[in-house]
Image: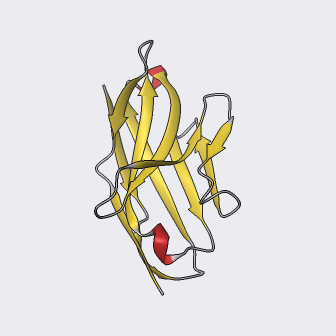
């Protein structure tokens, strides 16, 4: 079992920046990849960015060059630095980990990011 707690969401004007954090606890030794997803009203949840245990990263086309995912393995914390935010980035952002040999999904509770125009 892994527990995930996100923080760092909020309201920001277009062009601004926010940094999301996700603190993992519990059986963290079994974590493989970690990532951020988002879900806007009326839309499906989508992958924003992911990072492997070895540090390899993957980004959605819509955020590449603006967002940066990173992880601090010593602190068991995942980050998402979001720059040049756009109104279309408005969504609830969820932390996700892939855990164990079956790559089970664990989710955080979500944090709201609102970008005003």
**Residue at figure coordinates x 67%, y 28% from the top left:** 54
Q: Nearer the viewer, residue 39 or 69?
A: 39
- From the top left corner, tell me how far across and down residue 114 is, in percent: 40, 74
Question: Quadrant of the image for the N terminus?
Answer: top left
Q: Position of residue 100 (x, y in %)?
A: 43, 17
Residue 91: x %, y % from top left:
38, 64
38 or 6, nearer to the observer: 38
- At a point 37% along the width and 49% down the height, the residue shown is 45
Q: Residue at x 56, y 73 (%)?
A: 85
User: How many marks on residues?
Assistant: 0
Could one spot residue 76 in this view of the protein? Answer: no
Is residue 35 shown above or below 93? above
Residue 13, relative to residue 19: is it above or below?
A: below
Location of residue 84 by image quarter: bottom right
Whether residue 65 sits left or right of residue 45 in the image: it is right
Q: Is residue 88 visible?
A: yes
Q: Is residue 114 above or below residue 97?
A: below
Q: Residue at x 43, y 21 (%)?
A: 103
Up-down relation of residue 55 to residue 69 (above or below): above
Percent of width and height locating residue 33: 53, 30
């Amino acid at each position: 079992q892994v527990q995930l707690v996100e923080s760092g969401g909020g309201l920001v004007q277009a062009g601004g920046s926010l940094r999301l954090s996700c603190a993992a606890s519990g059986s963290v030794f079994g974590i493989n990849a970690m990532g951020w997803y988002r879900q806007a009203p009326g839309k499906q949840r989508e992958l924003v960015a992911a990072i492997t245990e070895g540090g390899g990263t993957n980004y959605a086309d819509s955020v590449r060059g603006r967002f940066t995912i990173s992880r601090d393995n010593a602190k068991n914390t995942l980050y998402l630095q979001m720059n040049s935010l756009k109104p279309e980035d408005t969504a609830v952002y969820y932390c996700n980990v892939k855990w164990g040999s079956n790559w089970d999904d664990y989710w955080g509770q979500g944090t709201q990011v609102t970008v005003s125009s």
